[in-house]
Image (cartoon, rainbow, N blue to C red):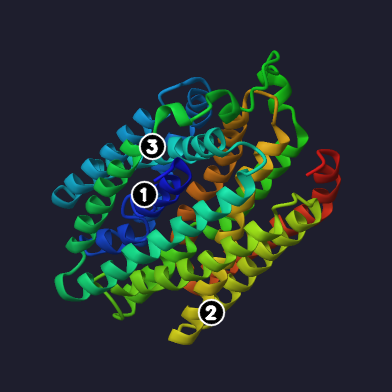
Amino acid sequence: MNSYNLLLWLNFFVADVRDGLGPYLGIFLQSHGFKEGMIGVIGSIASLTALVFSIPLGILVDKTRHKRMFVALCIILIISITSINYFYTYFIFTLVAQVVIALCAVFLAPAFAAITLGIVGLNNYAYQVAKNEAYKHAGTAFSAALSFVFALYYGIASIFIITALMGIFSLIILYFIKESDINHKIASGYNGSKPLSFNLVFKNPSIWLLGFIMFCFHLSNASMLPLLSQRAHSMGIDSSGAYAAATIIIAQISMIFVSIVCGILLRNNNYRFYIILMSLCFIGLILRGIIAACFTGIGSMILVQILDGIGAGISGVILPILIAFMLNKSGHINAGFALVMMLGGIGGALSGTLGGVVAEVYGYFWSYFILAFVAFIGFIIWIIYSRKYLFLFKI
């Protein structure tokens, strides 16, 4: 099997690993007496702590020729710390575990983008990223389906086992990707001339625009799925994690189709498609928050998760492609990627506190309403400025 196909299967298996328990964490902690606000604070502290290291880790991705080794180390750390957290659910240990997982996730995002770019090159990057995302979402849907079945019969403990097994398979796939297949210069956007200085890269207006857009997106989006699961738990609908697994399956199936469509539309790198797709991303997020606020039935849950699939599916595909083109020949693609991810991560970290505290004090309706309003702000900013900057950089 060549490295192109190995990349796809690596994304398939690692999808369930990179975020640890992900949306199941809230259910697991609630079953051990944690309140919504406390769960949100743990997520925020862990994410904000990890974000301090996001740019240094992005620089490491640009510089190192041992990307596979660092990816393997992150996977091993996530599996280990998540498994131990099952037996030690104290506040401090849970916080430490989430910090470790967040640090690994901050590294893995630019690392996977760099490995992909280094293997396929810039011309084939958009199509490969779309395929990677499709396989990643398929892997998440697969593990969520397993979690749904086993959580019904064996409880949330089975989810820990499934996460560990997916991690082991991802390590096996990673082993078969040859280091020699990765062009580390192409992976960083280095073209043989002197790389741009960090000052020029970080003064790039399009990168800061993209970073602010992703800040709004993740501030709105990050806590919606955990809140959906926590609301189901508080209403007595589910305490095993099966409901959370069902919501994930619906979203991930949507993301598979969205990723494929994005790959087809973006093969020619027409900047107009980027504007349209990101606009749809925010419109779907706004509708998702409004529907989640107003309705609690199964039908609304399905629609909410389809909209989640549209938003997350689109952003997951176009973000690394935009950055790769904007910073091509700079030698600092992954540092720029880390900067954008840092700003988005700040939004995601604050989302847990914003959504959790508002839900605890004012109820889930107002929590979803406020999150939808944040998405609306991001949408307006994107519409006003995106055409100018995307046109300037010939995307």
What residue is drawn where x is 47% and y is 35%? 111
Dot 3 amino acid type: Ile
- In the rendered structure, the answer to whether residue 195 lies left or right of residue 231 reads right
Residue 14 marker: 1
Between marks 2 and 3 in the image, the one whose residue lies nearer the viewer: 3
Residue 13 position within the rendered picture, expressed as x and y whole percent measured from the top left: 35, 52
SS for dot 1: helix
Q: Report whether residue 131 is seen.
A: yes
The three-letter amino acid code for the residue at tag 1 is Val
Q: Residue at x 79, y 49 (%)?
A: 386
Of labels 3 and 1, the one closer to you: 3
Residue at 44% from the left image edge and 45% from the top image edge: 7
Say what amino acid the circle numbered 2 marks: Leu
**Residue 177, disc:** 3
Q: Earlier in the sequence, mark 1 or mark 2?
A: 1
* Rendered location of residue 21, percent (x, y): 31, 55
- What separation in Å lies between label 1 and label 2 (alpha carbons)? 27 Å
- Label 3 to label 1, Cα distance in Å? 14 Å
Residue drawn at x 71%, y 38% is: 325
With respect to residue 95, does 362 lie above or below? below
Q: Position of residue 351 (x, y in %)?
A: 51, 54
Relative to 167, 263 lies left or right? right
Q: How many marks?
A: 3
Q: In the depicted view, which residue is nearer to us: 39 or 116? A: 116
Mark 3 or 1 closer to N-term? 1
Q: Residues within 10 Å of mark 2 (few under 14, many from 20)?
A: some
Q: In the rendered view of the protein, which quadrant contains the C terminus? A: top right
Q: Which numbered disc covers residue 303? A: 2
Rate crowding at label 3 as few (under 14), some (14 to 19) or many (20 or more) other CA atoms within 10 Å. Answer: many
- Give the spatial CA distance, label 2 vs label 3: 38 Å
Front position among marks 1 and 2:
1
